[in-house]
Amino acid sequence: MKNEQVLSFDAYFEEEVPDKNQEPYRIRHCKIYFYLEDDTIQVLEPQVKNSGIIQGTIVRRHRIPLPSPNEDQFYTIDHFNINAEVIFYARRYKIIDCDQFTKHFLRKMGFKLNPPGNRPDDPYTKERQKILDSVNPLRPYERIDTLKQFLEHDGHVLRFYCVWDDPESLFHDPRELVLHYYLSDDTIDIKEVIPVNSGRDVVPLFLRRDKLPKYAPTGLYQPGTITSRTVLNVFGNLVGNRGRYILDNRKTGAVHQEFYRDSDLKIGAVINVWGRQIMLCDCDEFTKDYYRTKYGIEDFTPVPYKAPPPPKAEKPIPPYTGFGSEEDSLCSCMSLLPKPPQKDFKKFMEKDRCGLESNTLRFLAKLVTDSPIDKDRKFIICYFLSDDTISVFEHSQRNTGIIGGKFLEKGRIKKPGQELFKSEPSEYFKAQDLFIGARVCFHGHNFLLVDADEYTINYMEKHANEFAVADTGFIFKKLKDIAEPRSREIRQVFAAADPQHTKVIEYDPFRNLIVSITDGAFSEHEIMTLGRHYGEKEEYEIDHHFLLAKAQEQLKKNSFENFEQLSTILVYNDREKCGALPYETCRTICKSFKLPLSDDLLQTILTMFEDDHKQVNYKKFVDAVNWREHQIPSFHTIKLPPKNEDDWNGQPPFLPVKRIKYLPLLDDLFGKEE
């Protein structure tokens, strides 16, 4: 594309320097850029250090007119070539070369390129370079260049973990140290790791940062003997009692002292730190990478210097005292001032009731007893996921002589068969212990869970990773392990249960077949989960006129009449002018327009006008809800299935599925039959 193509030319121009003998003129090199998209031209001069000239953009980007007498015309690509001259605003530019892209482009356009020209030197620059080359230092200064090392290794520090076995210590305990080697200037500092309650004073540094010398056998040198530079007094005090000093680049008479370098440090080495023998035992990962890269060292086996820590003494928990709950008794043993046991606040906030999400599992149960009076009693067991508490209510039945209502106060319930006074915390009933067909014992009362409401079943299927009885994959694998050896026999049993060859059977025969196949290994909840997965879903119809009439009623009550403005906004967002918008776009526009419809009703009505590509015909949608021009006169009835959760009174709800498609189940178990 032309809007991304720019021709680049190398050029120069001469500039006179008046009133200066050293430089009558200067040669200034520059770049000429020609933009193909609009024939604009830009001239840039590269920055030259210490040039004394303001450099950068010489001619800003625009179309440049030709010199007189053609001022009404502009420069085009035909005016550019190598070894050609162009005049921009009375300044003459000599083009000497161009880049490869420009050469290739011009040849492709049919231009015959001239050979590249020579680049003349600037006389002032050459003269100044001669002066700089001829300048020599008047004194033999010694140059100590540490800038390169600092720039390359600034912030790079080698870290070694060391130990010093102090022989003069009272208890002869090793003292742990951390040695830092700074690569920027070859200095070392050491810090001591002082344990808590060790009896030693806490000091900031064991050794301050400086170069660490390797000591000679003769001992310490006198102060001032070792210096980084040697200074010579040339005349002494003979001339005016004033000395004349120069640096001695030969270093005659200087004492040479060796300092520790990074090559001297390695794991297992012993270094002399002002008379103290310190062993390097380990290092960090950066240090290992540094030595691995620079010196090729691969062995970084640490030197053990610590005795293994003694086993941590376990604090025995005293047994339960019987006063209060087990948590209260345990908190009284943790501190002198007993604190109330902490609750799981995060779990409470996640599983607290929010809107239609009650986070409460409800089961229908009956007593497991031989008493003919208690057999017909029905109970509702509620498990609250927010705090793992359970409450039991009894359903009141007329003419039974038993008063219904609260049977068990809300609280956590221990599992039976546990010792009362013990140190270990007791086990309580969890949500995974409750499912259809489970037998539980609450304070000596045995319950059999016979059913659950629709919310509980849907919640367990939604969190199948927590509830194995609602995990279709786990149940299917379990059934396949049992039924695979008898595949032919099981196919015949299912075929016999469907004499009319309808490929579906009722739920009760299906349940009986699964029970006979598994020999009672499946619970009622697992069978129901399998039936719901392969069940035939019952479809029900919603009267669209009823929903539209309900939407028009809500709009009319809120006095909403801005249908033309809503239609204008939808048309504006339809960039392709196809009369349809995505579902989410329409929903967002309606929400931002503050259309007074409930979210569920708005979503349902938008779905009514969707096509196969999830595109909503917004014109039909606006016309349908426009109660001014297309008012629906009367409501129509809506056909819905019977309620099974909101008005659940403990009676068994209707089965979510009544008919089971058994052929997909058999195909998944044994493969498709040939």
Image (tube, rainbow, N blue to C red):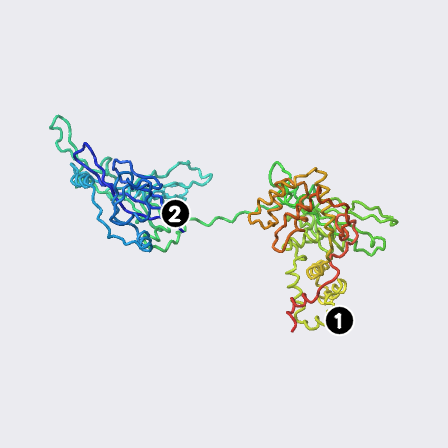
Identify which amino acid the numbered label 2 is placed on.
Answer: Glu
Across and down, in percent, residue 34 comes to: 33, 46
Q: Relative to 159, does residue 23 appear above or below in the rendering? A: above
Q: Quadrant of residue 129?
A: top left
Within 10 Å of disc 1 (Cα), the crowding (few <14, some 14-19, many 20+) is: few
The residue tagged with tag 1: helix, strand or loop? helix
Q: Is residue 226 visible?
A: no
Identify which amino acid the numbered label 1 is placed on.
Answer: Ala
Across and down, in percent, residue 303 comes to: 39, 51
Q: Residue at x 57, y 44 (%)?
A: 572
Judging depth in this view, the residue of 538 and 636 nearest the camera is: 636
Judging depth in this view, the residue of 161 and 287 nearest the camera is: 287
Q: Which residue is mark 2?
A: 37
Judging depth in this view, the residue of 165 and 587 nearest the camera is: 587
Q: Are marks 1 and 2 in contact (CB under 8 Å)?
A: no
Is 400 on the left-hand or right-hand side of 436? Answer: right
Q: Is residue 238 visible?
A: yes
Q: CA distance from mark 1 to mark 2?
A: 81 Å
The residue tagged with tag 2: helix, strand or loop? loop
Is 33 on the left-hand or right-hand side of 674? Answer: left
Q: Which residue is mark 1?
A: 496
Across and down, in percent, residue 655 comes to: 75, 57
Residue located farthest toward the left when viewing the structure as drawn? 238
Q: Residue at x 62, y 40 (%)?
A: 565
Work out which quarter of the rendered image holds the C terminus and state it. Answer: bottom right
Within 10 Å of disc 2 (Cα), the crowding (few <14, some 14-19, many 20+) is: few
Q: Quadrant of residue 594?
A: top right
Residue located farthest toward the top when viewing the structure as drawn? 240
Q: Relative to 555, does residue 456 appear above or below in the rendering? A: below
Judging depth in this view, the residue of 209 and 605 nearest the camera is: 605
